Amino acid sequence: MMIVAIDHVQLAMPAGEEAAAQAFYEGLLGLPRVPKPPHLEARGGCWFESNTVKIHLGVEDPFRPARKAHPALLVSDLAALAERLRANGVAVRDDEPLEGYDRVYVDDPFGNRIELMEPLELRS
């Protein structure tokens, strides 16, 4: 037996903020919102999934954002994504260099930390 992959990452969000989650994760990051299974829909929250990335947001009460723990998302054209985020009022923060990557941090609408990383080998 061995672990072969991560199926998804779950982050917490406050109740009733699905529209803000969709505006950020789908609208700005480009992860399509997908329907939750009907038996989970009543709990609130929302799921965003592509072929390679799955981020699930679940309602937590009381809500407290993840300020240190975070998903790190691999991206292409980090500069363009960072500019789109800034243009939409999202603070983009640089951090210590990490060999082989350009990277920045952002917070989702609820204060959860998200790392965006572009492998230098993907740059043209």
Image (spheres, rainbow, N blue to C red):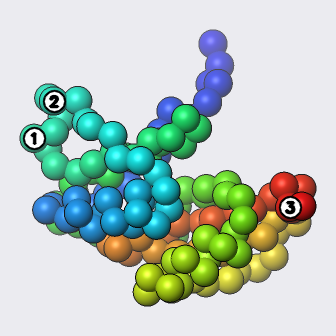
In the rendered image, is residue 67 in sight?
A: no
- The answer to whether the residues at label 2 and label 1 have Cβ atoms under 8 Å apart is no
Residue at x 41% of width, y 47% of height: 32
Residue at x 69% of width, y 69% of height: 78
x then y, percent, for residue 101: 81, 65
Residue at x 46% of width, y 67% of height: 28
Indicate the quadrant where residue 13 lies.
Answer: bottom left
Considering the image in quadrants, where does the C terminus appear?
bottom right
Query: Which residue position is annotated with label 3?
Result: 123
Query: Which residue position is annotated with label 2?
Result: 38
Q: Nearer the viewer, mark 3 or mark 1?
A: 3
**Compared to 22, does 83 lie above or below?**
below
Amino acid found under the numbered disc labelled 1: Ala
**Compared to 3, does 46 lie above or below?**
below
Gap in angstroms between the C-alphas marked 3 and 2 = 41 Å
Considering the image in quadrants, where does the N terminus appear?
top right
- The answer to whether the residues at label 3 and label 2 have Cβ atoms under 8 Å apart is no
**Horizontally, is 27 left or right of 41 in the view?**
right
Amino acid found under the numbered disc labelled 3: Arg
Packing grade of label 1 (10 A; few <14, some 14-19, many >=20) is: few
Gap in angstroms between the C-alphas marked 3 and 1 = 43 Å
SS class, disc 2: helix
x then y, percent, for residue 88: 44, 82
SS class, disc 3: loop
Amino acid found under the numbered disc labelled 2: Pro
Residue at x 55% of width, y 35% of height: 51
Instruction: Specify the label residue 42 is tagged with.
Output: 1
